[in-house]
Amino acid sequence: MVLIDTAEDLTKPILGFERETYICPSCGDTGQQTVFNKHAQEEHEAWIVAITPSPIAPPAPVQDQPTAQRFLRRMLAKIRALA
């Protein structure tokens, strides 16, 4: 049997499987076989790492706490003044 075609097999849950197609040179009969290609899996992992964005840093802590407290105090003072 002679290898004539190799195609990535995306039906498997793990990357790196390939479907190989063979043909017999004497009778012309064909057959397929699923094989695991470790190098293809490594290429997929490198590609995924390359396209994955870097993690976003969490936002800096909000420093507006005193401002919010002052605003609330002023609002409460105005409400008390109306009462």
Image (tube, helix red, strand yellow):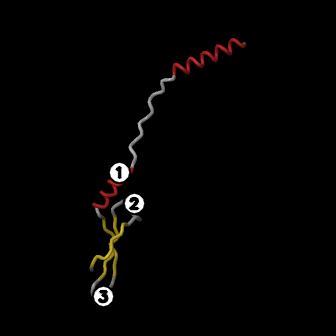
Say which label, 1 or 3, has the lower sequence index: 3
Residue at screen point 33% across, 74% down? 5
Residue 79: quarter of image:
top right
The image position of residue 69, as x and y in percent, is 55, 19
Identify the amino acid type marked 1. Ala
The residue to which callout 1 is attached is: 50
Residue at screen point 43% across, 35% down? 58
Depth check: 47 or 18 in front?
47
The image position of residue 13, as x and y in percent, is 39, 60
Identify the amino acid type marked 3. Cys
Tag 3 secondary structure = loop
Categorize mark 3 by other alpha carbons within 10 Å: few (<14), some (14-19), many (20+): few
Q: CA distance from mark 1 to mark 2?
A: 21 Å
Which residue in the rendered view is the most extreme toward the top? 81
Q: CA distance from mark 3 to mark 2?
A: 35 Å
Which residue in the rendered view is the most extreme toward the bottom? 27
Categorize mark 1 by other alpha carbons within 10 Å: few (<14), some (14-19), many (20+): few
Q: CA distance from mark 1 to mark 3?
A: 46 Å
The residue to which callout 2 is attached is: 13
